[in-house]
Image (cartoon, grey):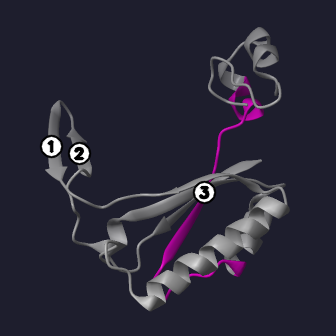
Amino acid sequence: MRVMVFTKAAEIGDVSAPTPEELEAFAAMDRFTEELVKAGVFVAAAGLKNGAEAKRLTFDGTELAIVDGPFAESKEVVAGFSIWQVKDVDEALAWVKRAPMTAGSVVEILPFYEVEDLAAFVTPEELAHEAPRGGERGKLGVA
């Protein structure tokens, strides 16, 4: 199963001038990511900016509200994400427990919909088309 692991910011800092503690935190996360790679769990990851380019869109019926970043409440900010290939959510949880997190960090593990989860919504032909093909995605966007 694939899961997306969201890491929410414990605190919004200035990445242009990282402190020695922040540099060590980045190094620790790099070491942890290497463990994920060696274990065959790591699929992809990226850190996310909370700067002036960030936008929050809120839909209320037909109305759309757009709020420009940065967002002040760090507990609302997704700082980064990872995609992992694991056997189940318990394995993902075990990996997160090993991650070098700072105090106040929040992590969310969300499983992806896989082909078998969508069986009630598609025809058998579409399911056959979506069968895993070496990472290639079909029209449903799942692999």
Q: Name the residue at the top extreme.
A: 125
- Whether 136 is among the magenta residues is no
Circle 2 residue:
58
Inter-mark Cα distance, 2 to 3: 25 Å
Q: Amino acid at mark 1?
A: Ala
Front one among 22 and 77:
22
Please state if 88 lies on the left or on the right of 60 as rendered.
right
Q: Residue 131, position in %: x, y?
A: 82, 23
Q: Residue 69, position in %: x, y?
A: 20, 57
Please state if 111 lies on the left or on the right of 104 as rendered.
right
Graded by Cα atoms within 10 Å as few (under 14), some (14 to 19) or many (20 or more), the crowding at tag 2 reads few
Q: Amino acid at mark 2?
A: Thr
Disc 3, disc 1: CB below 8 Å?
Answer: no
- Image quadrant where one finds the C terminus: top right
Circle 1 residue:
65
Q: Report helix, strand or loop for mark 3.
A: strand
Number of numbered discs overlaid on the protein picture: 3
Vertical relation: 52 (above or below) 15: above
Q: Residue 21, position in %: x, y?
A: 47, 90
Q: Is residue 90 visible?
A: no
Q: Nearer the viewer, mark 2 or mark 3?
A: 3
Q: Nearer the viewer, mark 3 or mark 1?
A: 3
Inter-mark Cα distance, 2 to 1: 5 Å
Q: Report helix, strand or loop for mark 1.
A: strand
Graded by Cα atoms within 10 Å as few (under 14), some (14 to 19) or many (20 or more), the crowding at tag 3 reads some
Circle 3 residue:
82
Graded by Cα atoms within 10 Å as few (under 14), some (14 to 19) or many (20 or more), the crowding at tag 1 reads few
| Location of residue 115 (image quadrant) | top right
Front one among 5 and 52:
52
Vertical relation: 19 (above or below) 34: below
Q: Which residues are magenta?
A: 98-119
